[in-house]
Amino acid sequence: MRAILILVAFVLVTPVQAADPAALRARAALALAFASPGPKPPTYAEAYKTASDSGKPLVVFVGQPAKPLAGCVCVAVEAFPQADRPAVVVGVPAGAGFRRVDLPGKPGAAAIRAAVVPPAGVTILPATK
């Protein structure tokens, strides 16, 4: 597909523009930019494994794009069990799994961070492997 786009970019160049190497480079760069798919976002299963292995909180953005949050593994999904859209489901490492905290709507980073920190007086044991 990339080769076809580059070929089309060169074919569509008029003879006046063909003499200008800068125009050819610009068209080739533009064709490559549109041909590159970019990095593939992680799946829920990949994010869950990463969070479980690293002991980091798992932040699942339901029906909305994922936003990065320092110290957390973030992933976007279209639907999630027992969660309305849009929502954020936070999995805080607890024992051998995760403690689930549901945040409705589109909460900001401060609200998500508050869900990651355990409530006062509650001790969360580190995840075991």
Image (tube, rainbow, N blue to C red):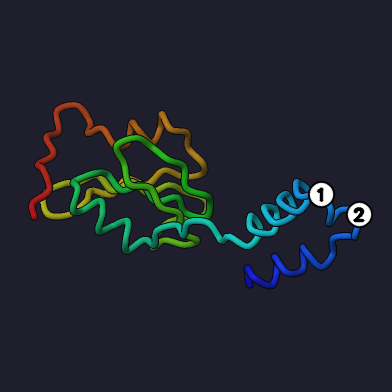
Alpha-carbon distance for marks 2 and 1?
Answer: 7 Å
Q: Is residue 117 left or right of residue 88?
A: left
| Residue 101 position (above or below residue 2) | above
Q: Residue at x 84, y 64 (%)?
A: 12
Residue 17 located left or right of residue 126: right
Q: Is residue 110 left or right of 73 when viewed as pictured?
A: right
Q: Quadrant of the N terminus?
A: bottom right
What amino acid type is highlighted by mark number 1?
Answer: Asp
| Callout count | 2
Circle 2 residue: 16
- The residue carrying mark 1 is 20
- Residue 7 location, quadrant: bottom right
Task: Indicate the amino acid at tag 2.
Answer: Val
Residue 29, percent from left and from top: 67, 52
Quarter placement of the C terminus = bottom left
Q: Are marks 2 and 1 in contact (CB under 8 Å)?
A: yes
Q: Is residue 128 above or below residue 115?
A: below
In the rendered image, residue 34, in percent from the top left (x then y), is placed at 66, 58
At label 2, counting other C-alpha atoms closer than 10 Å, the crowd grade (few under 14, some 14-19, many 20 or more) is few
Element under disc 1: loop
Is 83 on the left-hand or right-hand side of 3?
left
Q: Is residue 43 above or below residue 54?
A: below
Dot 2: element: helix
In the foreground, 11 or 84: 11
Position in image of residue 116 (x %, y %): 29, 37
Which residue occupies 41% across, 29% down?
110
